[in-house]
Image: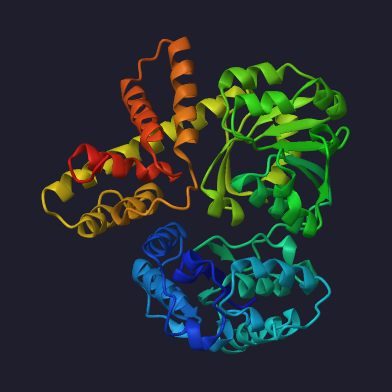
Amino acid sequence: MNNRYYLMRHGESRANQADKIISSPENGCAGYGLSDLGRAQAERQARESGLGPETRVICSDFLRTRETAEIAAAVLGCLPPVQDVRLRERHFGVWEGTSAAHYEPVWRRDQVDEGGDEVETPALLTERLRGLVEELEARESGQCFLLVSHGDPLRFLQLWALGRATREHQSIRHFAPAEVRALKDAPAPSARLDIGFLGLGNMGEAMAANLLRAGHRVTVWNRTPARADALVAAGARRAEQAWEAIPAGGLVFTMVSDDDALRQIADDRFHQQLGADGVHVSMSTISPALADELSGRTGTYLAAPVFGRPEAAAAAQLWICLAGAGEAKGRVTPVLRLLGQKIYDFGEKPSSANVVKLAGNFLLASAVASMAEAFAFVEKGSVERGAFYELITQTLFASPVYVGYGKRIADLNFQPAAVPPALIHKDLRLLLETAESGAVPMPIAAGIKQQLLTLLATAEREEDFSSLAELARKMSGLGAF
């Protein structure tokens, strides 16, 4: 090509927060701009993109992309963005304003490029996007362009640039909010594998769905069978018993709540079915001791716990901590890339990844507990919570944890319970047990664990663990127990 092209999806928007499909210009041009987290995402990703002031930014005229492009241009120090309607969101017809769950049936139908429901077809979408790039190629040379658009348009644009058929769009990894990617920087389609996936909670269901979208043959199991219904409707096979989901000598992923749940699954029948050539990839937050125990069983055991909330799992933007035998890691890495934005390798001992995961969750719990107390402190001092949030997230603490959890704490909005207090309490228990066995004093972790126990004992309904903020308010006389 005569020019260099980079693609950027908009940051998290009000439409994403509302779980709505907003694809018509009537709704998208004037409303549904970026959330506070979306603004922070756009700034961070632009700063980390490696692009400079010579970049020319072109964006859709939808509000969420205009705001993303303006932030990116300001960070890069380049000229203001130029709008082009060819970068608009794909039109989703009758699904306008409905739940984002309706994306899935549209994407399945895309594999045969059929129209219907007034949805813009892949062919028409690709044609308008291609027209923009071809026009720039004919008019310019040696330039660097950043095209700011929406998830579907960007994936179909990459397919065209890579010379792939539109029906292969699931081979292009979904763009995370505000992600920047070179036009031709997309993984080659991977071979279709038989994969087992056990554990379909909020995280596991989203991860298994991404493996299905990539074209793999996925067999799923969950203790509550109904959790598998949506995946089965999308093409997965349902196993009646956990071991039945394991392809002999193949790959099986587990994503369960705790040590006990994993022990119940990874029994003798599990390892007999796995066989000597099979690989068990445990993505759960479990104790390092259990990881060491499972490392000695039949097959190869890899630890691959993740950082990220359910929405990050759905967008394949998890951070994955990987540890275990090198050959097996090479075998599973192409699959893990379908689930996360980056893989961090912590060596040959699987339990090392679990140590890292527990340490990271301790830091997360510490940040949330500290914010809970800090917000109670400023509120007691007659400072508006939202004003304090704006200050800390735009200065010293402009990071995903403070932006995301800080918003919940500032708004006292703790539902849905994406991370229940019981799970973080469990993680800190495992952390402290491991620390004690290694003679590592962790008094801060012990204190937060006690706060979580108080929260569990006094909670009237299930809320996110960031409801530690409400406990801090009550202990400060700002609310009644």
Residue at point 74%, 58% (across, down): 213
In percent of width and height, residue 272 lies at 86, 23
In the picture, residue 183 is in which quadrant?
bottom right
In percent of width and height, residue 274 lies at 84, 29
Image: 255 above or below 111: above
Is residue 330 shown left or right of residue 142?
right
Of 418 and 163, which appears nearest the observer?
418
Residue at point 77%, 37% (across, down): 252
Image: 70 above or below 185: below
Of 125 and 79, which appears nearest the observer?
125
| Residue 54 visible in the snapshot | no
Is residue 194 shown left or right of residue 319?
right
Image color mode: rainbow
Residue at point 64%, 18% (across, down): 292
Report the label total.
Answer: 0
Of 62 and 261, which appears nearest the observer?
261
Of 163 and 69, which appears nearest the observer?
69
In percent of width and height, residue 131 lies at 65, 87
Image: 44 above or below 135: above
In the picture, residue 44 is in which quadrant?
bottom left
Is residue 395 shown left or right of residue 340?
left
| Residue 52 visible in the snapshot | yes
Residue at point 38%, 44% (across, down): 466
Report the quarter where the N terminus lies: bottom right
In percent of width and height, residue 371 lies at 28, 43
Report the quarter where the C terminus lies: top left
